Image (tube, grey):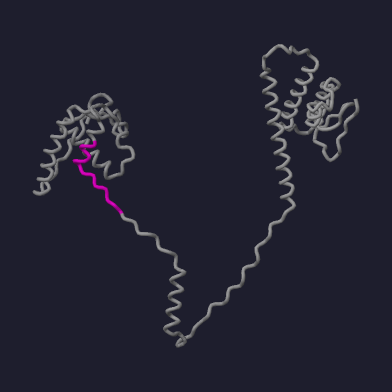
Amino acid sequence: MPRVDVAASAVQPYRVSIPQFDGPLDLLLQLIERNKLDITHVSLAAVADQYLDYLRSSAQVDTDELAEFVVVGARLLLIKSRALLPRNDEADVDDEAAVDLTRRLRAYDAFRRAADALRAREETGERSYPRLLPPAPESAPPQIIGPGETTLPMLQVAYQQALTRRPPSAPHGTLVREVWTMRSAWRWLWDALGGGQRSFQTMVAGFRRPRLVATFLALLESSRLGLLRTEQAEAYAEIRVEPTASRDEAMERVETLGEEWASSRRSGAEPVRCAPPESGQGRKAVI
């Protein structure tokens, strides 16, 4: 079998040197797959021993290069085992391991070509120099006009030029104040409860301060009137809300309260205040 030599320009960090071949490992695989070298005349044990000697002599092991050797070596081992072992032509069973290895080898070859292209671009970029911008032209010194030398047309032109240099003003926005009354908060609270127990923090998540305050006052007023029951295990803990009356009863009560609130505002009387929370049920405080 003739010896295949590779030019020195294609030398890789690791080279295979056997009687039948001298060059990079991936090139050895390509020649074998193209039937330009007989795999049965290639000693894979010698290839592995040379690579182990190469690793021992290297100051630092490149994990990427090591992974490439494992992939290519596995492919060579598979090809040689197929060449030496008899095959059953009547068997119609796909060799999944061989198919997967072939797919990995093709992916490795594609990545290797991409790496070579990127390396060539990097080398080209190291030898290129960006073109510098031309120096900015020197601005003319400002013209100073003395007293009595200014005319009305000159002032008009200067004023128009100043207006064109002025940055455009931001568009004026419209602020809309959110109106959220106690009656609206009351209706929303009972619609959100839906007849079951819920977390107050979950219900009002994302509320702005005016809506949050109005809803919390509606909660306190409903609790004071005995329309719902609230529980809090400890300070700053979650508030659990559970209705003790029907929604229709609560809506009738809010209509009555609306008339009382309107009458209090007209007469200037002090508004109804919520009763302080009761306590004494272990660690739970019921409002």
For residue 259: magenta? no
Counting from the top left corner in percent of width and height, residue 66 is at 74, 29
Counting from the top left corner in percent of width and height, residue 227 is at 17, 30
The picture quadrant where one finds residue 273 is top left
Question: Quick one: which residue is furthest to the front in this view?
Answer: 90
Question: Quick one: which residue is furthest to the right in this view?
Answer: 2
The picture quadrant where one finds residue 212 is top left
Task: Please indicate whether residue 115 sits to the left or right of residue 196 in the image.
Answer: right
For the C terminus, the image quarter is top left
**Residue beneath the point at 29% across and 28% down:** 233
Is 80 or 52 nearer to us in this picture?
Answer: 80
**Residue beneath the point at 42% across and 83% down:** 152
Counting from the top left corner in percent of width and height, residue 46 is at 84, 23
* Magenta stretch in the rendered image: 175-188
**Residue beneath the point at 17% across and 28% down:** 246
Counting from the top left corner in percent of width and height, residue 96 is at 66, 19
Task: Please indicate whether residue 10 sits to the left or right of residue 159 in the image.
Answer: right
For the N terminus, the image quarter is top right
Is 197 or 83 nearer to us in this picture?
Answer: 83
For residue 185: magenta? yes
The picture quadrant where one finds residue 35 is top right
Number of numbered discs visible in the structure rendering = 0
Question: Quick one: which residue is furthest to the bottom in this view?
Answer: 148
* Image height of 98 relative to 139, above or below: above
